[in-house]
Amino acid sequence: MKEYISKIEKLVKHAKQISITSHKNPDGDAIGSSLSLYLFLKKIHPQVRVILPNEYPDFLKWLPQQEEILFFTKHNKEAINYIDQSDLIFSLDYNDLSRTGDMQTSLENANADFIMIDHHQQPASYAQICISQPEIGSTCELVYEVLENWNRELINQSIATCIYTGIMTDSGSFRFPSTTSRTHQIIGHLIDLGVNNAEIHQNTFDTNSYNRLQLLGVALSNLKFIEEHHTAYITLSQKELDQHNFKKGDTEGFVNYGLSLKNVDFAVIFIENKEEGIIKISFRSKGDFDVNQYARKYFSGGGHKNAAGGRSELSLKDTVQKFLATLPKEK
């Protein structure tokens, strides 16, 4: 990590304006890494903004200074102008500009150096500095390593809170195999800096609405178990989402219920999105089954070995049929 720091410091020092960006439909790791880096850079640089493609779920809207984020969908002209005038852009928690949705064209046209900090597989080659470590459980863990090697003394409670949140959410509350002893060492330091870990867990997970719990009931009633393939899957139609006043983030974690079944090592959730004309798909696995490769092969997606996403432009019914047809070939 240390070999990157002097190069990053040099680019930051000579930059007049810096944009920090992350992927479409940002999650806890995307927001946590973006805000932690923002709060750090604000201490040493006057012109820094976080620009995200679109808004994120309400259960993450308590993070420090999240109100300062520019959303490309909501503040379009301001966001375009800021990116256009930036000479340094950080790519956090994504490794291909296609992951940024409507923001992609502005980033492709930017006359700026890029610094990528990411933990997904198969990074594209657009960044001048590329810190890509797929074996690490979260981008927030990588951002911590960068900041610690850069200037450990500048990491305060607010920065630590953002990093903790990203590591926690992307590690399944420290349950996933990518959680290492180093992860826990980092968490220990963050708590020493004043992070209220119990409050973070409560703010993030204990915020269920009545509608979300009702929707979870529908999802579980739709759960199917395919014993011979050790697979479970859930479907949610647009009608079912509308009946329960679906809000962004309401289906977060639903796929893990399928994975929690005994003798299941592969779980999927299919969610209809009429507005975008697609079926959004989340894949989870245990052990050696690689859902990153599976998602890339069949559903225009990707991610990590045990957690990935994908999409389908077929109907919900046809998407499920396509999925079922793949199981005998892959499992």
Image: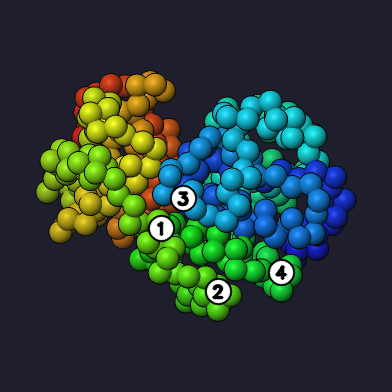
Q: Nearer the viewer, residue 52 or 178?
A: 52
**315 relative position to 64: left or right:** left
Report the Cα–Cα distance between label 4 and label 2: 14 Å
Q: Which residue is mark 3?
A: 60
Q: Which residue is mark 1?
A: 203
Report the Cα–Cα distance between label 4 and label 3: 24 Å
Q: Relative to 124, does residue 120 appear above or below in the rendering? A: below
Q: Which residue is mark 4?
A: 154
Q: Relative to 17, does residue 167 appear above or below in the rendering? A: below
Residue 96 spot, x, y in % from top left? 59, 39
Instruction: Give the total number of marks visible in the rendering.
Output: 4
Label drawn at residue 301:
none
User: Toward which corner of the image does residue 193 lie, by quadrant?
Assistant: bottom right
Discs 4, 3 touching: Cβ within 8 Å: no
**246 relative position to 27: left or right:** left
Q: Which residue is mark 2?
A: 194
Q: Residues within 10 Å of mark 1 (few under 14, many from 20)?
A: some
Name which of mark 3 and mark 1 comes first in the sequence.
3
Q: Quadrant of the N terminus?
A: bottom right
Q: Residues within 10 Å of mark 3 (few under 14, many from 20)?
A: some
Report the Cα–Cα distance between label 3 and label 1: 8 Å
